[in-house]
């Protein structure tokens, strides 16, 4: 097995919470050395978000694996000098502050690029680095709304809902990581120099909206909330069972015929008007009613067994408890287990995607606050006396 693809790539992470750090986590999982800069005191606020174990968020353990923690006060000039020193030796710098913040600290792209022409800078923000909304604060929830996602989520006639996850942040983080890989390829394989990746939360989500805008510009069609169904693609919905709901996606032409045969509705399966998706979409209420009438008389397990036998895609709606005990997750090693700094066992998603020859790996647990400050700064050239002076003035911790 070959080594990890990004081994030797040095990443300086200045972001907090989710989007920028998620991009850095993705790079770290495939071998990059990620030095995470945290403010002295409490560090990244994610350390205290949601459920805590021995005083530290278990989310932090998943988000910050494979990283080193260095405490630097970026509000002080000497702290900014440290960042310039580290950036001069880095391949990638990641930040997700409000646009203008890095410039205020003397850490603009122009400054850093002059110090290190090979540096790649990933800038993640709510609305991007330019445009009329650039300087406004933007969290994932607002990006999801601006991208059209919130409008679609929910039941018709009811208030929009959100997924119980920060999708805007993580999806922007993935776009940012992709941008970094493209920029590294351009720099190293094609003799280029570093460049800026401008990743906006709302644009990263907008990129996932499929035919939403083409349908509006071509037909004036505004897609509306549709609950659990998938508008215009039929049948695909959540159907009631005796003990809950089951998802069935019978929207392929041959799959649809097998589904109708399975539920004893060959009349619908053989109807020429329903042979293709456009015809089924026009009569989706009739088809969904037929499927629901059949599933409602059976348990989830009975429905899934029948669908599996018929070769129809279907699935249980998993809670995290279902995920934790599912044998398929375990068979594919999709759940990783580490021991946190407190010594307590933590399970988390493993490294994805799976590469056959250069797989990613969880090499190190998430760091304690400032755990690597001395080691990283010593490697960057700061003497023990210099570090002691900086620590005495509260610049590092």
Image (tube, rainbow, N blue to C red):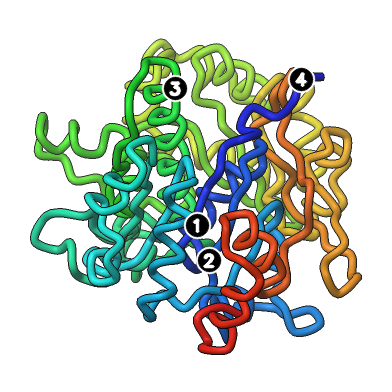
- Disc 1 or 4, which lies upstream in sequence? 4
* Measured Cα–Cα span from mark 1 to mark 2: 6 Å
Q: Is residue 309 above or below residue 166?
A: above
Name the mark on residue 188: 3
Sequence-wise first label, 2 or 3: 2
Which residue bears the numbered disc 2? 37
Mark whose residue sits in front, 4 or 3:
3
Q: How far is disc 2 from disc 3 in space, using C-alphas?
A: 26 Å
Label 4, on which residue? 2
Spatial separation of the CA atoms under disc 3 and disc 1: 21 Å
247, 243: nearer the viewer:
247
Residue corresponding to mark 1: 13
**Contact check, label 1 and label 2, Cβ < 8 Å:** yes
Sort mark 1 into few (<14), some (14-19) or many (20+) by Cα contacts within 10 Å.
Answer: many
Mark 3 lies on a secondary structure that is helix
Q: Is residue 88 left or right of residue 192?
A: right
| Percent of width and height locating residue 98 | 29, 67
Image quarter hosting the C terminus: bottom right
Q: Residue at x 67, y 42 (%)?
A: 29
Q: Nearer the viewer, residue 372 or 377?
A: 377
Of mark 1 and mark 2, the one earlier in the sequence is 1
Element class at badge 2: strand
Q: CA distance from mark 1 to mark 4?
A: 26 Å
Left/right placement of residue 86 relative to residue 317 reads left
Tell me if mark 4 has few (under 14), some (14-19) or many (20+) residues whose alpha carbon lies within 10 angstroms of its own.
few
Question: Which residue is more in the foreground, 387 or 255?
Answer: 387
Residue 221 in sight in this render: yes
């Amino acid at each position: 097995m070959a080594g990890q693809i990004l081994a030797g790539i040095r990443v300086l992470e200045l972001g907090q919470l989710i989007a920028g750090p998620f991009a850095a986590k993705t790079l770290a999982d495939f071998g990059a050395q990620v030095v995470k800069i945290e403010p002295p005191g409490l560090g990244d606020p994610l350390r205290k978000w949601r459920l805590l174990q021995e005083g530290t968020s278990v989310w932090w353990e998943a988000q910050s694996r494979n990283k080193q923690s260095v405490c630097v006060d970026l509000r002080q000039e000497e702290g900014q000098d440290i960042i310039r020193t580290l950036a001069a030796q880095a391949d990638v710098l990641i930040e997700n502050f409000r646009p203008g913040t890095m410039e205020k600290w003397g850490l603009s792209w122009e400054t850093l690029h002059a110090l290190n022409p090979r540096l790649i800078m990933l800038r993640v923000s709510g609305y991007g680095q330019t445009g009329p909304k650039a300087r406004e604060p933007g969290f994932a929830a607002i990006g999801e709304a601006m991208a059209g996602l919130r409008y679609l989520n929910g039941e018709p006639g009811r208030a929009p809902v959100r997924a119980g996850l920060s999708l805007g942040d993580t999806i922007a983080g993935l776009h940012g990581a992709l941008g970094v890989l493209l920029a590294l390829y351009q720099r190293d394989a094609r003799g280029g120099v570093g460049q800026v990746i401008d990743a906006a939360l709302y644009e990263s989500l907008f990129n996932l909206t499929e035919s939403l805008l083409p349908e509006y510009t071509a037909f004036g069609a505004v897609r509306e909330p549709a609950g659990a169904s998938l508008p215009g693609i039929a049948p695909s919905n959540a159907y009631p069972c005796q003990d809950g709901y089951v998802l069935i996606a019978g929207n392929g032409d041959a799959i649809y015929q097998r589904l109708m045969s399975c539920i004893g509705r060959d009349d619908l399966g053989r109807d020429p008007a329903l042979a293709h998706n456009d015809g089924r979409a026009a009569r989706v209420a009739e088809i969904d009613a037929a499927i629901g009438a059949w599933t409602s008389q059976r348990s989830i397990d009975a429905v899934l067994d029948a669908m599996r036998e018929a070769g129809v895609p279907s699935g249980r709606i998993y809670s995290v408890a279902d995920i934790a005990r599912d044998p398929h997750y375990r068979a594919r090693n999709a759940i990783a287990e580490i021991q946190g700094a407190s010594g307590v066992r933590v399970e988390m998603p493993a490294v994805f995607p799976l590469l056959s020859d250069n797989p990613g790996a969880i090499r190190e647990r998430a760091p304690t606050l400032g755990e690597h400050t001395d080691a990283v700064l010593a490697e960057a050239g700061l003497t023990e006396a210099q570090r002691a002076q900086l620590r005495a003035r509260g610049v590092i911790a």
